[in-house]
Image: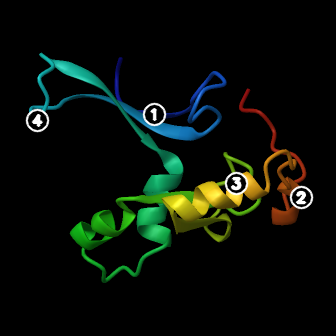
Amino acid sequence: MSGARFETKPGSDSGSGYERWRSYELRPSTDVEGKEDVYVAHHRLLAVVECYAASTPLWAILADLDGKDVHHANGVKWDNRPENIETIDHGEHAKLHAETAGEAPTPDAGGIEEVPADD
């Protein structure tokens, strides 16, 4: 694999449908020999720059994100516009989704009607 790229996680299990950053790199902090795939959810990367002041040290942001989820206000997993994401405590996030289970996402609430596929 050459270089890093964005992709959408396939399938129907946990995390599917979310955009993620994928790279292939050497990670000396793990027991794996050589390079390995590394994934980071796109919305979590965006939360670092969109949900915190630029003056906040990275260590403080990462500490605050520990135990938090990044919530998509309109329920659309790939809608990563800054106004659609917010950090929320994991327990509160689970409760919120339990209350709205079965409701369809509302992409039109964010002004999205249709997003063309990359052909």
Q: Which label's residue is closer to the chain start, 1 or 2?
A: 1
Mark with earlier residue (3, 1) = 1
Q: How many marks?
A: 4
Nearer the observer, disc 4 or disc 1? 4
On the image, numbered disc 1 is attached to which residue?
5
Q: CA distance from mark 3 to mark 1?
A: 29 Å
- Residue type, label 1: Arg
Mark sitting earlier along the chain (4/2)? 4
Mark whose residue sits in front, 3 or 2: 3
- Give the percent coordinates (x, y) of residue 44: 46, 54
| Kind of residue at disc 2 | Asp
Quadrant of the drawing holding the N terminus: top left
Instruction: Give the number of the mark in front: 1 or 2.
Output: 2
Mark 3 or mark 4, which is nearer to you?
3
Q: Quadrant of residue 49?
A: bottom left
Q: Which residue is mark 3?
A: 97
Residue underneath mark 4: 29
- Depicted 50 relative to depicted 43: above or below: below
Mark 3 → mark 2, Cα distance in angstroms: 19 Å
Which residue is depicted at the point 20% across and 21% down?
35
- What crowding class fits label 4: few (fewer than 14 Cα within 10 Å), some (14-19), or many (20 or more)? few
Q: Is residue 69 left or right of residue 37?
A: right
Indicate the position of residue 66 as horizontal and vertical percent values.
35, 59
Mark 3 or 2, nearer chain start: 3
- Secondary element under disc 4, as helix, strand or loop, is loop
**In the image, what residue occupies the spot 45% across and 33% down?**
5
At label 3, which amino acid type do we have?
His
* Left or right: residue 21 compared with residue 34: right
